[in-house]
Image (spheres, helix red, strand yellow):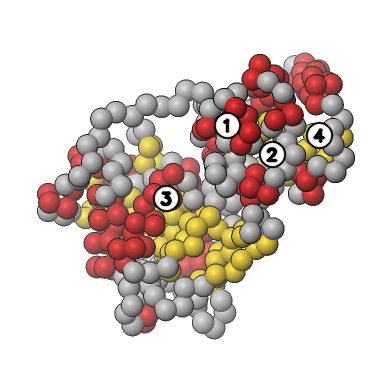
Amino acid sequence: MKLKKKIFKGVWTLGEYREGNISSVSYELLSWGRKLADKLGEELVSVILGYNIKNKTEELISKGADKVYVVDHPALQYFTPDVYPKILENLIREYKPEIFIAAANAFGRTIMPILAARLLTGLTADCTDLDIEENKGILIQTRPAIGGNVMATIVTDKCRPQMATVRPKAKRPLEKNISRKGQIIIKEYPDMVYKSKIKFIDFIKDKSIETPIQEAEVIISGGKGLKSERNFKILHELSREVGGVVGSSRPPVDIGWIPYSHQIGLSGKVVSPRLYIAIGISGAVQHLAGMSSAKTIIAINKDFDANIFKVSDFGIVGDLFEIVPILIGRLREYKNKEI
């Protein structure tokens, strides 16, 4: 919105409600928002939409929010990409936040571009860092560019709100503080606002992966070096030992060895786990852009010159079919000793 910037105040985060619970990424966003709001000296607001959620939002206050706007309506039981942005637009035009951030997951990546277009403002997607420029109060948005080879710094100087999506797991939630006080405000709109051109038919959960890959703390990822679909079973064995989930580069997905929901990279999911183990992955720039912000990266590849080693904290050069079974065995030995 091209209006006088002084009338815009506050930092907003977009909460998410899934399967009866507020998702963990909502609290990560509050951690990002708290940092920005404190630097600006302004309030931190969480906005959450859904159905039967009125009595489940106190946790957002205890995890950092000063205020929570809740829109609770039967039409919001399932996500529709035309109704959600419409409601958020109404809220933003009424209260005029300075900054609005969401998660760079399927939910945020769907809503935020539509919302930015409706508000005629900018949007920086898939940020790995957010900060406030001293003396100017402008949001500094940092994200990978050119296949992850450089980090771009982006600002939205002319329009408000300043909008961005940030990678899940890039920041830890704040500690819960049950003594924190805040406001929970229930917003209501006429029925016409909830009308959708989209008919919800059914939600089919992907049973090939227990934890959404963008929320996983540990990811064991395989590439074309695994040679066949059946060899992915050793990745599943390893993931069970370390409490992780299985990911993949693009080639195994294209061949049909593993479902698309496991794909990591620019054309798949962008992840930021605590630990990323890349097995038989050469390291194309598209894949690196999807996982290079992991806290610790371990690569196993027989090619000493594989590109994956350039972003790895630890590298093992050798045959994965020899190394991974040894690694699984050692982990099991270690667990048995603990018992």
- Quarter of the image where the N terminus is located: bottom left
- Mark 2 vs mark 1, foreground winner is 1
Q: Secondary structure at mark 1?
A: helix
Work out whether mark 4 precedes mark 1 in sequence or the reverse, and give the earlier one: 1
Distance from the alpha carbon under mark 3 to that under mark 1: 26 Å
Work out whether mark 2 precedes mark 1 in sequence or the reverse, and give the earlier one: 1
- Mark 3 vs mark 1, foreground winner is 1
Q: Residue at x 42, y 68 (%)?
A: 122
Q: Residue at x 25, y 56 (%)?
A: 86
Q: Secondary structure at mark 2?
A: strand
Distance from the alpha carbon under mark 4 to that under mark 2: 14 Å
Disc number at residue 301?
4
Work out whether mark 2 precedes mark 3 in sequence or the reverse, and give the earlier one: 3
Distance from the alpha carbon under mark 2 to that under mark 3: 23 Å
Work out whether mark 4 precedes mark 3 in sequence or the reverse, and give the earlier one: 3
- Quarter of the image where the C terminus is located: top right
What amino acid type is highlighted by mark number 3? Gly
Disc number at residue 254?
1
Residue bearing the label numbered 2: 276
Distance from the alpha carbon under mark 4 to that under mark 3: 34 Å
**Between 339 and 211, which is closer to the camera in this rendering?**
211
Work out whether mark 4 precedes mark 2 in sequence or the reverse, and give the earlier one: 2
Residue 30 image point, x, y percent: 47, 55
Work out whether mark 3 precedes mark 1 in sequence or the reverse, and give the earlier one: 3
- Mark 4 vs mark 1, foreground winner is 1
Residue bearing the label numbered 3: 108
What amino acid type is highlighted by mark number 1? Asp
Q: Confirm or deny contact between disc 4 and disc 3 (CB under 8 A).
A: no
What amino acid type is highlighted by mark number 4? Asn
**Position above or below: 242 against 185:** above
Q: Secondary structure at mark 4?
A: strand
